[in-house]
Image (tube, rainbow, N blue to C red):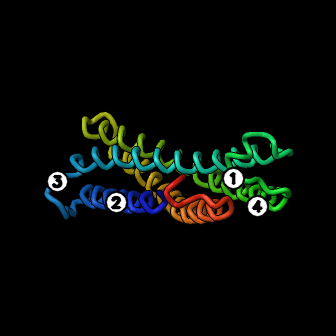
Amino acid sequence: MAYLLRVLIALMIIALVLTVLAAMGISLVSLGHIQLAIPTFLFMIFVQALVMFYFIGVARMVENLHNILHSSQNQTQPQLHELFESPPEDLAPYLKKVRQYVYESTLGKRKVIPWTMLMLTLGTFAFLLGGAHDTGLVPRNVHVGVVYGFLMATGVGIFRQWYYLGKGHKLLRELKALFQIPNQQM
């Protein structure tokens, strides 16, 4: 999933670059700025929503595993049998490792989601102000200023997303190895 999200982010960057270049009068495709801005904005919303759901989902899954291990102090509880065919006597190594995974997944979520929300907010304002500029209600400078802020937030946000998507993918691979979960699951 992390690889798919990285491909979608790369496509989003290409669409943003094409849209900005069209606004500057450099047209690499036969579409105008407004014709590119609408699908680019919709695609950006789609990609950023998927990125947020990925990080929220990874953090929630790791927290659920942590809760199952902590609530299963005795091996007779059925929840522990969901993780192991035959539960081990000593859960301490699993608890320590999962506690580290909880920290890493929560850190990734906390580092990415605020920037993602800022990108979505500024992108929405830039899109709406672009429409307002097109109808003559807002000066061009207002639209361009918000677009610059959006592009700066997107630069930082995409860098963080790219980095933490890699860390999240590695975390899931280690989690699968720890609990011997087949690659087709999760």
Residue plotted at (70% across, 48% down): 65
Q: Earlier in the sequence, mark 4 or mark 2?
A: 2
Seen in the image, is 52 located left or right of residue 131? right
Q: Nearer the viewer, mark 1 or mark 2?
A: 1
Q: Which mark is residue 85?
A: 1
The amino acid type of the residue labelled 3 equals: Leu
Residue 186 lies, in percent from the top left, at: 54, 52
Q: Earlier in the sequence, mark 1 or mark 2?
A: 2
Q: Which mark is residue 31?
A: 3
- Asked whether the beta carbons under mark 4 and mark 3 sit within 8 Å of each other, the answer is no
Q: Which mark is residue 60?
A: none
- Asked whether the beta carbons under mark 3 and mark 1 sit within 8 Å of each other, the answer is no
Q: Nearer the viewer, mark 4 or mark 3?
A: 4
Residue 6, image quadrant: bottom left
The amino acid type of the residue labelled 2 equals: Leu
Q: CA distance from mark 4 to mark 2?
A: 35 Å
Q: Nearer the viewer, mark 4 or mark 2?
A: 4
Residue plotted at (66% across, 55% down): 105
Q: CA distance from mark 4 to mark 1?
A: 19 Å
Single out the residue that lies furthest toward the left. 30
Disc 4 crowd, CA 10 A, few/some/many (<14, 14-19, 20+): some
Judging from the image, what secondary structure is the residue with disc 2 in? Answer: helix
Q: Which residue is under mark 4?
A: 97
Residue 173, above or below 120: below
The amino acid type of the residue labelled 4 equals: Lys
Q: Which residue is under mark 2?
A: 11
Judging from the image, what secondary structure is the residue with disc 4 in? Answer: helix
